[in-house]
Amino acid sequence: MPYKVSVISEGYSKETKEKYMIANCTCTVVQGDVNMVVDTLSPSDASIILAGLDRLLLKPEDIQYCIGTHGHTDHIGNLNLFPHATHIVGHIISENNKYWTHPFDIGKDYVIDQDVTIIPTPGHTLSCITVAVNTPDLGMVAIAGDLFEREDDIGNPLLWQTAGSESLQKQLENRFKIINMADHIIPGHGPMFKVLPEYKESLKFQLEQGLFT
């Protein structure tokens, strides 16, 4: 069955005058031979996820994989909605009370099937992952978590740098890797965007120059 990718809640982030962030992540559902939810919003957002699944004619028990692109609260707040799914958060995989690690840390992908692969993309955190999905309508869709804050951060690197990065260099390298693989990117805190040739050129220049500010 061909895969379909649906954003059920679009992420956002902004600073306030009080010097804290107002933010929530993007929540995405992948439907096909395997059904997945990627990044489950903040703990108060269960109703948003349930409503989104309902629109897609899905129930929590229809989800085989529940993915957190990294372990920050706004990305893993509702894992409990999917007790029967395989959970992958960062480098840790779990089923019920069983836990094991996958060697993402040495660059090994986790292949779900020929059209869905989970790729290690450290930077924002050192255990960040990206879900790559081949689709017939959008091409390769990279559900990238906070590897990309939003589309604007391609031209304004300060947007992703100031959002926090455990390794600026690794994040820049993986941004370049993913933008050269993907046709569309779903960032952590903004709408899905199409990868344009000038975006690839911009990140190539930044990588060559080491532009972190």
Image (tube, rainbow, N blue to C red):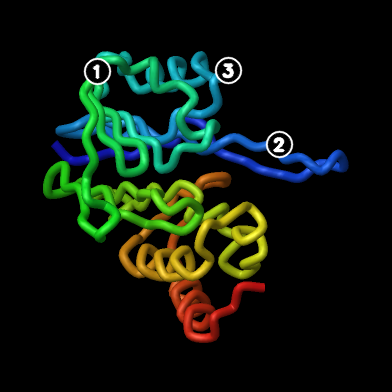
**Which quadrant holds residue 176?**
bottom left
Q: Residues within 10 Å of mark 2 (few under 14, many from 20)?
A: few
Q: Earlier in the sequence, mark 2 or mark 1?
A: 2
Q: Is residue 93 left or right of residue 8?
A: left
The amino acid sitting under disc 1 is: Asn
Along the line of sight, the residue nearer the viewer: 19 or 116: 19
Judging by the rendered image, the residue that carries numbered circle 2 is: 22
Judging by the rendered image, the residue that carries numbered circle 3 is: 44
Task: Reply above or below: 84 against 4.
Answer: above
Q: Residues within 10 Å of mark 1 (few under 14, many from 20)?
A: few
The amino acid sitting under disc 3 is: Ser
**Which quadrant holds residue 22?**
top right
Q: Is residue 192 left or right of residue 81?
A: right
Along the line of sight, the residue nearer the viewer: 54 or 87: 87
Question: Disc 1, disc 3: CB below 8 Å?
Answer: no
Q: Residue 139 placed where, x, y %?
A: 29, 55
Q: CA distance from mark 2 to mark 1?
A: 32 Å
Q: CA distance from mark 3 to mark 2?
A: 14 Å
Looking at the image, which residue is at 25% across and 60% down? 107
| Secondary structure category for the residue under label 1 | loop
Q: Residues within 10 Å of mark 3 (few under 14, many from 20)?
A: few
Q: Which mark, residue 96?
A: 1
Q: Earlier in the sequence, mark 1 or mark 3?
A: 3
Q: Residue 99 placed where, x, y %?
A: 24, 29
Question: Disc 3, disc 2: CB below 8 Å?
Answer: no
Which quarter of the rendered picture does the N terminus lie within?
top left
Which quarter of the rendered picture does the C terminus lie within?
bottom right
